[in-house]
Structures are given as C-alpha cells and as structure tokens.
Amino acid sequence: MGDESLAGRHSRGPRSVRGSGRRARRNGRRPRAGGFGGGSAPAAPRADADDSDACREAALTLLDAAARSSGALARRLVDKGFDANVVDQVIDRLTRLGLVDDQAYAQDLLRSCLHRTMGERGVLSEMTRKGLDPRLAAQVVAQASRDGLFVDSAYELGRKVARKTAGLELKVRKRRFWSAGSRKGHSPGLLNQVAADLFVPDDPLE
C-alpha cells in the first residue's frame, strides 16, 4: 500500500465501531470486550506477527477509532500480538506521513484537560497515562505553566465551586474547593491564592 493511499484512507474519518460489532456477530464472532479503548491481556501469538502490512492495517483501524499517541498505539499493537520491531517500523512510517503526531496530540490533550479545569500535576499525569513521551509531556506542561494557563484553570475552577456552594459556610466552601483542586492536580500554593481571592467573608457571590 502506497503512502498516498494510507493518507487517503485515514482522511475518510473514523469507522463505526458499532457497525463492526454487528458484522462480527453476524459472522459468529463476538467483539472483544472493551472495544478499542478497553484494557486487555496480550493476544496469543499470531501467524502474521511479522507482517508489516497487517500491522499497518491494524494501526489505521485503531487511529480511525480514536486519536492516539505513538506510545499508546504501540502498546495496543503489541497487545494484539504484533512484533515490537514491526510495530516501531509501522509507527515511524505513519509519523512521517503525519498520521501520528505526538506534538499535535499533546496540544489537543492539553486543551481538553484545561477545559476540565485540571492543574499542572493532573495534566502531566494524564499525558503520561495516554502514552506520550515523558519529556514531551513535561515540555508542553512547562510551556503552559509559563503562559499562565494553569492559573486561569484554577481560577475558573474556583469560580465554579463558588457558584455551586453559594450560601454555605465559608469553611465548607473552601474545603470543597480544596478537595476539587487537589483531585484535578493543582498546586497547594495556587489553591491558596485562589481561595484567598474568591472565598472571603461577605463574598459577593453568596
């Protein structure tokens, strides 16, 4: 399969996972539990483990279902029984074609995390969990910190908690903010700053 064909196939967009499940049931096979995103034990050795074409097709199917980092994609392919060296070769080729782009994936994931009002520690943990190289994750998070994005995220979280807890005792409101901020990975110092600014006696939000 040529490089142009690979890029063209992927540009058609995600396939229907639900439709694949129906086809599998019609053929007497059950779809694997958890779908594309579910965790699973490594597959049994497969006859085409060294077949780069089969590995590439499996990689494209996974990418059709959801965007993935190179690390997450490699794990899934190895779990499917493909040889690790073949997997590396396939991912290198897909990266050259622009079908796997860890930098772009990291930026998309950062935006998603900030939308969920997550903090620096939380975002770094999420990026690592999603298979991004720790060095790349650290660089993206460090730049976001320099740009003040986590400060904005913490204040947005503080405003949300302030609205939801209006009318409660001040200590209760602060405690709920601290609990939410800690779960989302904000630093204690930043949480202190936000709490001091937004949760004060005679708060106008109350």
Image (cartoon, rainbow, N blue to C red):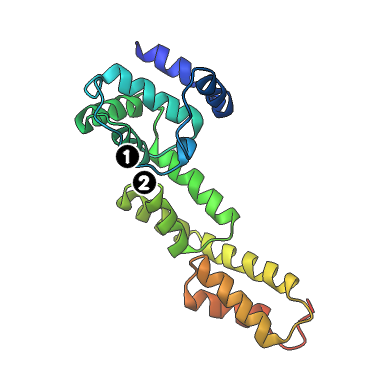
- Residue toward you, 22 or 168: 22
Q: Quadrant of residue 4?
A: top left
Q: Identify whether 171 is placed above or below 139.
A: below
What is the number of the mark on residue 131?
2
Tell me if residue 155 can be seen.
yes
| Residue that carries the numbered disc 1 in the rendered image | 75
- Label 1 vs label 2, nearer the camera: 1
Question: Percent position (x, y) of residue 202?
Answer: 77, 87
| Quadrant location, the N terminus | top left
Q: Check disc 2 and report its element: helix, strand or loop.
A: loop
Please tell me which residue is depicted at 30% across the width and 39% down the height of the picture: 42
Please tell me which residue is depicted at 31% across the width and 37% down the height of the picture: 79
Q: Residue furthest front?
A: 28
Distance from Cα at disc 1 to Cα at disc 2: 8 Å
* Other residues around mark 1 within 10 Å, as few (<14) / some (14–19) / many (≥20): some
Name the residue type under label 1.
Arg
Q: Check disc 1 and report its element: helix, strand or loop.
A: helix
Name the residue type under label 2.
Gly
Sooner in the amino-acid sequence: mark 1 or mark 2: 1
Q: Are marks 1 and 2 in contact (CB under 8 Å)?
A: yes
Q: Quadrant of residue 70?
A: top left
Q: Identify whether 68 is placed above or below 125.
A: above
| Quadrant location, the C terminus | bottom right
Locate residue 71 relative to residue 88 in the image: left or right.
Answer: right
Question: Percent position (x, y) of residue 150?
Answer: 52, 63
